[in-house]
Image: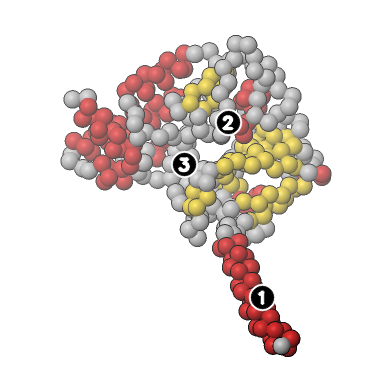
Amino acid sequence: MRKGRRSKERLFYWPSRALLGLIFAAMAMPAVWAQGPALTTISDTVYRADGTVAAGTALISWPAFQTAEGNAVTAGTKTATIGAAGAFSTQLVPNVGAAPTGTYYTVVFQLDDGTVRREYWAVPTTSPATIASVRTTPGTGVANGLVSKQYVDAAVASRAADAVVVVTEDAVLAMHRSHAQDVKKIVATGDLMESRLAYMGDAFFDEWVTTLDALKKLDFNVDLPGHGIPFGDKGLITAFQSYLTDLTRQVAQLKSQGVSAEDAAKRVNLTSHAKDFPQIQGPGADVRGVRRVYAWLDEKR
């Protein structure tokens, strides 16, 4: 009897152990499936202009994009520290060949001597990569130059009694300095004026241009936009007004010729504005904005 009982116990024990093994294997499988896209390591030594090794931080931001392999990447930011002897290392998802076209990492170096440098990166799948190999200027492949230190100091200044500061996801990149000065002339424009081409799917273009005129008359040192990086050059506002005017003029002409909004979005040529807005890679415009121009023109009749 005892032997028979042991046999039954053994018969129960082995299938149970096998079942548990299958359960653990199944639990482990999602961890493999959930692995994200491969990362590229960017590793290098950062130097100052005088050739000495640098110290400080690199503030990195990126828009949402889809990798060449089809992986979806959400917009985000990260901070990388420049270590001892200028050592720098960070890992990023490759964006070379990503969609939409013209997707870049924006990197703002903030060095301990007060130097501020902005760069655009196109990260390949080959790892590791150097900073020099990923550095680019949209549309040219040439490294971007220095930006004003003023916008960083202003963007991270202590909140003054008469200052208006709105912190947005992208503006956070410029708000990591611990020795900021008092600033009293900051304007937060949200989506009215960005440091890049803004979404136009619900715009009233004539009112937009007029409002930008009023913005230029304000006395401010730094514009904190809803997207992009803070800036202080009012010439960028004029450049955007010129873009809006050129866009609506070309689209209106194509509409009058019976061209559909979708075809017009492919045919407009705004490359003359690429020097101010590097995301312009060639002819064409966001079809959502062009459709809105069509609707806006009909509304104005």
Q: Which mark is residue 17?
A: 1
Q: Earlier in the sequence, mark 3 or mark 2?
A: 2
In the rendered image, the vertical position of residue 68 relative to residue 140, given as above or below: below
Residue 84, given in percent of the width and then of the height, sits at 82, 44
The quarter holding residue 220 reads top right
Three-letter amino acid code at disc 3? Gln
Determine if residue 68 is in view: no
What residue is pinned by disc 3?
Answer: 279
Quarter placement of the C terminus? top left
Q: Earlier in the sequence, mark 1 or mark 2?
A: 1
Residue 126, given in percent of the width and then of the height, sits at 62, 60
Three-letter amino acid code at disc 2? Ala
Three-letter amino acid code at disc 1? Arg
Residue 250, given in percent of the width and then of the height, sits at 28, 35
- Residue at image point 38% right, 31% down: 243
Between marks 3 and 2 in the image, the one whose residue lies nearer the viewer: 2
Quarter placement of the N terminus? bottom right
Q: Secondary structure at mark 3?
A: loop
What residue is pinned by disc 2?
Answer: 171
Between marks 1 and 2 in the image, the one whose residue lies nearer the viewer: 1
Between marks 1 and 3 in the image, the one whose residue lies nearer the viewer: 1
Residue 58, given in percent of the width and then of the height, sits at 68, 40
Depth check, front residue: 101 or 276: 101
